[in-house]
Image (cartoon, helix red, strand yellow):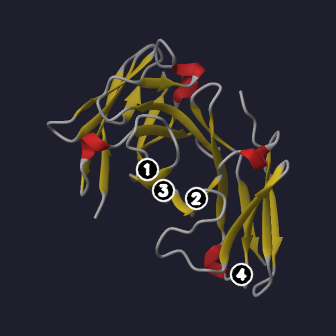
């Protein structure tokens, strides 16, 4: 059974940093593209970033480019999102999600974690 | 970047058919995927590649895609179908995943 467990959320001041983690199990982690998707309170889903199975290829939505860094440790089956220069508008539940594709591109997300809440506020 | 447009809300009586649309420029040439999200829960994939269902998703839930509109159809609607539904495509020009704004399905 595929399981994705996020951690690392919390309250941070504007301009601060936070590192999210996602522990994966139940599948061969290094074979699959992974993504982070966020959902601001009362709002819809927004794709944030994706990373290839090898970790070489990365993609970001425009609003986080230069501020967020996605990475993975395939030896520990863990996905990360390093967030810096955080803004109030980054406040959201952040979901880790597994893509169906093995090749390296993005496609669609067949398994999701339960999410971790990031609150950016002074 | 590619824009997906969904109605904010759809209401339907139990036992009837709900149709949730997702509009996009020539979306019929794209692969569309649909997610269901119930309050306080993570999204769940319910339709992929326009009309395929993951295991465990009832046959009452189906999808179609043509022209400028993709449609998620839920037949014989039940109270348990009440949720937010999101369409999603891969935008090849930006290499991003794109979600529609979501549609809240209310069962009357």
Residue B50, by quadrant, is bottom right
Q: CA distance from mark 3 to mark 2?
A: 17 Å
Q: CA distance from mark 4 to mark 2?
A: 20 Å
Mark 3 sits on what residue?
B42
Q: Is residue A74 above or below residue B69?
A: above
Q: Nearer the viewer, residue A75 or A7?
A: A75
SS for callout 1: loop
Task: Give the residue drawn at x 39%, y 39%.
Answer: A33
Q: In which quadrant will I find the N terminus of chain B? A: top right
Q: Nearer the viewer, residue A93 or B92?
A: B92
Q: Disc 1 to disc 2, how far (Cα)? A: 10 Å
- Neighbourhood count class around disc 1 (C-alpha, 10 Å): few under 14, some 14–19, many 20 upward: some
Residue A111, picture quadrant:
bottom left
Labelled pair 1, 2 in contact (Cβ < 8 Å) = yes
In this rendering, the label closer to the viewer, 3 or 2 = 2
Q: Chain of mark 3?
A: B
Q: Position of residue A62 (x, y in %)?
A: 59, 20
A22 relative to B9 in the view: left or right: left
């Amino acid at each position: 059974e595929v399981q994705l467990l996020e951690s690392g959320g919390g309250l941070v001041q504007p301009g601060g940093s936070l590192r999210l983690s996602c522990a994966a199990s139940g599948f061969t982690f290094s074979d699959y593209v992974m993504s982070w998707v966020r959902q601001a309170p009362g709002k819809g889903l927004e794709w944030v970033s994706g990373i290839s199975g090898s970790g070489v290829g990365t993609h970001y939505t425009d609003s986080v480019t230069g501020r967020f860094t996605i990475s993975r440790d395939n030896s520990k089956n863990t996905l990360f999102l390093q967030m810096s220069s955080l803004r109030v508008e980054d406040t959201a539940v952040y979901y880790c999600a597994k893509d169906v594709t093995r090749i390296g591109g993005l496609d669609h997300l067949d398994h999701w974690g339960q999410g971790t809440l990031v609150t950016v506020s002074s | 970047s590619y824009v997906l447009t969904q109605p904010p809300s759809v209401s339907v009586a139990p036992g009837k058919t709900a149709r949730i649309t997702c509009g996009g420029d020539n979306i019929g040439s794209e692969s569309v995927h649909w997610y269901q999200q119930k309050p306080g829960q993570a999204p769940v994939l319910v339709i992929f590649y326009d009309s395929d269902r993951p295991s465990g998703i009832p046959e009452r839930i189906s999808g179609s895609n043509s022209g400028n509109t993709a449609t998620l159809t839920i037949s014989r609607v039940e109270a348990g179908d009440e949720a937010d539904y999101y369409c999603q495509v891969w935008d090849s020009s930006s290499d991003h995943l794109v979600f529609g704004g979501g549609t809240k399905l209310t069962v009357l």
